[in-house]
Image: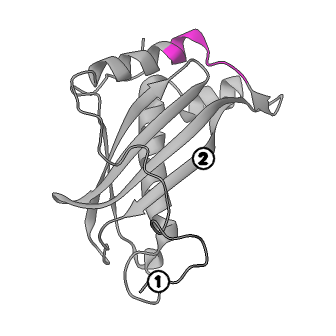
Amino acid sequence: MSALPIPARGIVISHCEVLPAWLDYNQHMNVAYYLVAFELGIDDYKAIVGLDLAYIERELRSTVALESHITFQNEASLGEKLRVETRIIDFDGKRAHIYQELFRGETLLATQETLSISFDLKARRSAPFEAHIATGYRELMAAQANLERPKWVGRSIGIGKGKPGQSVS
């Protein structure tokens, strides 16, 4: 059973605001702060599955990222209110495939996929999730069962059909 109520559709909603320190020399949100916004969403979903700060400090168990992929769709500016939507795409008892979208109103600003793994902070190595945490993941995924797979999931990065180093006309 999860630590907090599972959202109705299984999508965890988080909110943040673009702060002055988040701006780059182009006067829009620096790419590093897209990660900060997404991490706020990670913290919120982790609390729902039972991986809140109290649990992490008490049990010395958390998650660590193995891989991440971000797409940037639109820019964000100072003072804008942003919404992060986080969901679990897959889970196997030790790893979680997380998908997130960052919005300003209904405008998609960015997406992020992350593969994370359960981590024993004392042993400094991976370990299976404890049973109640695994149950929280399964409940969150079950709540999303009727949602379509996001079109951005599984994208790869590349320039196109040309060979590396070949110029494109």
User: Dot 1 corresponds to which residue?
Assistant: 24
Q: Quadrant of residue 154?
A: top left
Residue under the image location 33 percent in, 51 percent down: 101
Residue at 45 percent of width and 38 percent of height: 98
In the image, is 3 to the left or to the right of 107?
A: right
Q: Is residue 51 left or right of residue 106?
A: right
The residue under label 2 is 67
The quarter holding residue 88 reads: top left
Specify the amino acid type for callout 2: Glu
The image's colouring method is one colour
User: What x and y, as percent, mark residue 12?
Assistant: 32, 37
Q: Quadrant of the C terminus?
A: bottom left
> What is the distance, in whole Å, between disc 2 and disc 1 at their CAs?
25 Å
Q: Is residue 11 above or below residue 67?
A: above
Query: Of 163 and 141, which appears nearest the observer?
Result: 163
- Crowd around label 1: few <14 · some 14–19 · many ≥20 (10 Å): few
